[in-house]
Amino acid sequence: MEHLWAPWRIEYVQMKRPTGCILCDKPKEDADVANYILYRGTLNYVIMNSYPYNPGHLMVAPYRHVATPEDLTPDESCEHFEIIGRCVKVLRQVFEPAGFNTGMNIGKVAGAGVDGHIHSHIVPRWQGDTNFMPVIGDARVIPQALAETYMKLAGKL
Ligand SMILES: [Zn+2]
């Protein structure tokens, strides 16, 4: 995989991590739009990555605090993968990417941003990628880009 140039992520890399688990907390807050939660399944939900590698970077996570995929129940596991498929389908329709990266980073050493609560990343890919993100290291553009992406995807999953 080629490295994506994503200068806006410096804010994420440098920030102090909140205590607790955001993947447990966000769905309990009853603020899906503010939290960029796009879809709630029975056992898993979809949340936009606030520090995306590309527009439309989504994450699928179980509601339950599970550190590793072998601890998912068969039902959680099945729905998790079904929702990944749903995300890919909708992203394809809305953004017409040329491809996707999907996968999990398990453990800090593997690059997990939220260690201890598994989540699958779905990152749409284009030829030339960052040409599509109207950002030249300007962090203020990110919330606007996130809100626009949310509006494009809301209700479609
Ligand atoms: Zn958690």
Image (cartoon, grey):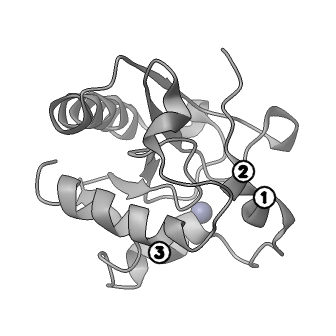
**Amino acid on which disc 1 is placed:** Ile
**Amino acid on which disc 2 is placed:** Pro
Relative to 137, say whether 21 is above or below: below
Secondary-structure class at tag 2: helix
**Amino acid on which disc 3 is placed:** Lys
The residue indicated by pointer 1 is 10
Number of marks in picture = 3
Quadrant of the displayed image that contains ligand 1: bottom right
| Label 3: how many Cα within 10 Å (few below 14, some 14–19, many 20+) | some
Relative to 116, say whether 111 is above or below: above
Dot 1 and dot 3 residues touching (CB under 8 Å): no
Q: Name the residue rendered at 53%, 62% in the picture.
A: 50
The residue indicated by pointer 2 is 7
Q: Name the residue rendered at 88%, 37% in the picture.
A: 109
Q: Is residue 9 visible?
A: yes
The residue indicated by pointer 3 is 26
Dot 1 and dot 2 residues touching (CB under 8 Å): yes
